[in-house]
Image (spheres, rainbow, N blue to C red):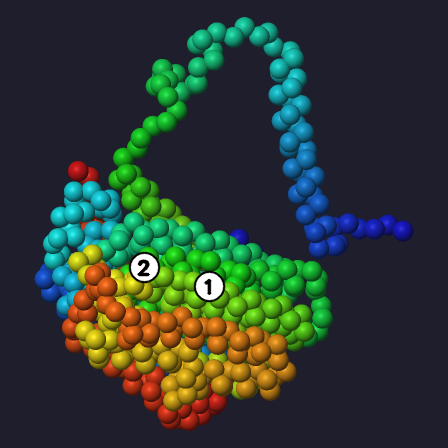
Amino acid sequence: MLNTVTLAADIKAPSMNYEALAPMLIVFGAGCASVLVEAFAPRAARHIVQTVLTLVALIAGFVALLFVDRDGLKTAADAIAIDTTGLFLQGTILVLGLVSVLLIAERSLTPGGEFVAHAAVAPGSTDDKKLTASVYSQTEVFPLTLFAIAGMMLFVTANDLLVMFVALEVFSLPLYLLCGLARRRRLLSQEAALKYFLLGAFASAFFLYGVALMYGYAGAVDFASIHNAVQADRGDETLLLMGLAMLIIGLLFKAGLAPFHSWTPDVYQGAPTPVTAFMSACTKIAAFGGILRLLYVGFGELKDDWRPLLIGVAILTMLVGSILAVTQQDLKRLLAYSSIANAGFLLTGALAMNKEGVSSTLFYLVAYGFTTLGAFAVVMLVRDADGEATHLKRWAGLGRRSPIIAAVMTFFMLAFAGIPLTSGFTSKFAVFSAALAGDAVSPVIVGVIASMILAFPYLRLVVLMYVTEPGESGADVHVPGAFTSAALTLGVVATLLLGVAPQPLLDLAEQASQFVR
Amino acid sequence: MVVDVTSSYLGQYASLALMLLVGVGFISVSLLANRFLRPATPGAAKLSAYECGVDAVEGDWARSQIRYYVYGYMYLLFAVEAIFLFPWILAFDLPGMLVRSAVEMGIFAALLALGLLYAWRKGVLRWV
């Protein structure tokens, strides 16, 4: 009894800097409020209430972010590091999350929106047919999206491995569910959700085992202690290297880097397109935010051990992504392989191990996020009676029937290919020059080659839209609703602005590349 | 020179390994001894599975109502979350911690209750 009392007396309540945590708390709180809306609001009002609540929460979170102290601080018993890099990543997640929510909220393209009303109804059953015909929709996607965004925000500021793991699960679990909610092609969607869940659980297990080994090595799980233990060279090196390898495997999976990329095409294809857009923009930001913090803050001293290996991963990822993108016949799969290759470019920047490496990676994440969101928004518009027409053949001759949408898609494809005056050129230039300055020559050479290979599938789509005769099976282009139009406009404007006048954001990213340990 | 195995990192687990070894050995030796000492007269009744004295129902595959899943899930949730109450017990009667800890645990319990409320509103708790 006496023993417990002395133990209890040692407990100190951690101090919380609520101002610095406000952006996250707002989004988490809105998630809870959104669950209440789901439970108590009348069905007819839910969609509008949820949309407004989600958008307002994300804007409020962003406004709160602007007031956070930018000197870099640690709070909640040093478990959360609010530094400029973390704030930049949080802001990016909020803005791109907002654009994704616009796509998620869109209901004018198909009656009831892109999400199935009752996910538990067996696909192909009579109930399912009734459900497809009805305009009945569900709005659980909004709380799930809010929790995912909040989890990502926590993930990029986590300063210890346990908080990082919890945040990883907080943003992954809603994503697994969101993948399985497509209204059309439900079997494909459920397959995507199951694959993502099983492989994601596997990756989480690796990460958790890595945390355990790291605790065995350093006797602590926060980055500062691990850094000190590495610097003082104490503890068992076997535990350290095995633990680090497992942590990196967990994060490589989330970022879709080869050889842990194989879930990406199936999941991107099966998931509802707004969710695919959300994943390709925001999950990528969260995963790379985590990789940057882990490698730079926790294990920077060990870079001679992990850097050669990760350079190999970057090279493999760029080659796998670009070569397999050439063979794709489905547009969503093509964009999935393109996102794998882009993850390779991002890792090239992250491996530069200098200030420019961090800032160029941050810039790349913003630029790529806007372009990919825009491209998936266009995918949502090209439809036939069965939903989206994602087979490349169906896009033949699109340039004649709807010149504006074809022009917008062409612009996004040119940005992906890295043509000057688009954000794709600026961001690729930034990561490659940072990597060269950081003496990582081989991934840059492979990166340039991969960019050239990747230009082929992008330009093939452009040729299909403008030159090829439209076949019998051409798809219709739907008029975008207000939300999709807004998302498309934001995507085009950001891609153009970041290509023509990238300096303000480059400067911001430059100031933002400051970690606290 | 005497080497103290318990001082190395994995050596700390030596006593656990010994314990496991003794446990496995004890069970196998006693079962084997039984096997050789007892008379063997198998019969249909003796070979059937023992279910608390009730006659065994046929087949080892049984369907259970899917609704049990949601109930089991919600039970598990609360059972696991209850573990978080234990560190709280240690802290809440310290001077100056009473209100603070009560509020914080209140928030925690409210978040859990939110999930229960949601399940209730969605008709999960209705057994028909």
At horizontal 45% and vertical 54% (from top left) the residue drawn is A199
Question: Is A118 left or right of A271, judged from the image as shown?
Answer: left
At horizontal 32% and vertical 69% (from top left) the residue drawn is A277
Q: Quadrant of residue A220?
A: bottom right
> From what the image shows, is residue A96 above or below residue A337?
below
Mark 2 to mark 1 CA distance (whole Å):
20 Å
Q: Is residue A417 visible?
A: yes
Count neighbours of disc 1 (C-alpha within 10 A) and say few if under 14, some if 14 to 19, many if 20 or more: some
Q: Quadrant of residue A168?
A: bottom left
Kind of residue at disc 2: Ala
| Nearer mark to the viewer, of 2 and 1 | 1
Question: Is A190 left or right of A83, judged from the image as shown?
Answer: left
Residue B29 pos. (x, y %): 67, 23
Residue A430 pos. (x, y %): 49, 86
At horizontal 70% and vertical 51% (from top left) the residue drawn is B10
Kind of residue at disc 1: Leu
Residue A253 pos. (x, y %): 49, 62
Q: Are marks 2 and 1 on the same chain?
A: yes
Considering the numbered disc 1 on the image, is that residue within a helix, a strand or a loop?
Answer: helix
Q: Is the C-beta separation of discs 2 and 1 under 8 Å?
A: no
> From what the image shows, is residue A211 above or below residue A24?
above
In the rendered structure, the residue with mark 2 lies on which chain?
A
Q: Which residue is mark 1?
A: A324
**Which disc number belongs to residue A271?**
2
> From what the image shows, is residue A6 above or below residue A294?
above
Q: Nearer the viewer, residue B15 or A37?
A: A37
Q: Quadrant of residue A393?
A: bottom left
In the rendered structure, the residue with mark 1 lies on which chain?
A
Q: Nearer the viewer, residue A78 or A168?
A: A168
Q: Nearer the viewer, residue A172 or A112?
A: A112
